[in-house]
Amino acid sequence: MTEERNTEQELNSQTDEETVEEVFAENEASEKTEEMPAQEEEQDPMVKKVAELQGKLDEAENRYLRLQADFDNFRRRSRIELEASAKYRAQSIITDLLPAIDNFERALKMDVDNEQAKSLKQGVEMVYRSLLDALKNEGVEVIEAVGKEFDPHLHQAVMQAEDENFGPNIVVEEFQKGYMLKDRIIRPAMVKVNQ
């Protein structure tokens, strides 16, 4: 019987120990759950603050990217404008020289009969050629007109004719030469077009 009591006491003590452990475990769990809301309350403002700072960071990064894109666009536009101004820098002087070149061409069409006039005409022709060479070095080209199909971008039609030797819409005669500076029309050719 003593043995039975000892076993009973051991079982009771084990049960009591288990019960005590369960109570302690429950207490610890309840303390943890009480601490968790307190920690969540402490973390909640932190989470809000982090979210707010992340939003500000995203906004600042977006603004930075937009500014960088604007600056890149500005730099590209400036480069294009600089290239265009360098490419067409001589346009205004060329436009001013074209009437003088037209006058040289008219003077060279004149017939001369004496030696003095011939030498003067020869000097005028040399000046005319040097002007054309200088213009050619700047990228100026004469627009071909006679025998070509009429192009409203290159030619200015001032008259129409009916000539059987030419097809329809072909330039028959050129009244004034046209000029291009690289790929830009300085002055269209003034022409007569076949119907």
Image (cartoon, rainbow, N blue to C red):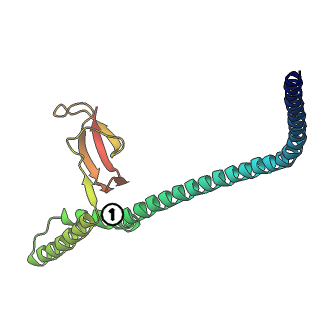
Q: Is residue 56 above or below residue 110?
A: above
Regarding mark 1 in the picture, which secondary structure is present there? helix
Residue at 14% across / 73% down in the picture? 122
Q: Is residue 47 above or below residue 193?
A: below
Instruction: In this rendered view, identify the residue nearer to me: 88 or 16.
Output: 16
Quarter where residue 6 is shown: top right
- For badge 1, the amino acid type reads Leu
Label 1, on which residue? 98
In the foreground, 58 or 67: 58
Q: Residue at x 44, y 64 (%)?
A: 82
User: Residue 98: x, y in percent?
Assistant: 33, 63
- In the picture, the quarter occupied by the C terminus is top left
Q: Residue furthest bottom?
A: 116
Identify the residue at horizontal 19%, vertical 65% (top origin): 108
Instruction: Answer left or right for 81 relative to 193.
Output: right
Quadrant of residue 99 in the image?
bottom left
85 in relation to 45, above or below = below
Residue 171 relative to residue 32: left or right: left
The quadrant the N terminus occupies is: top right
Left or right position of 106 against 155:
left
Q: Position of residue 79 (x, y in %)?
A: 45, 61
Q: Where is residue 31 in the image (x, y as percent from the top left)?
A: 90, 41
Q: Mark 1 Cα within 10 Å, few/some/many (few <14, many 20+)?
A: some
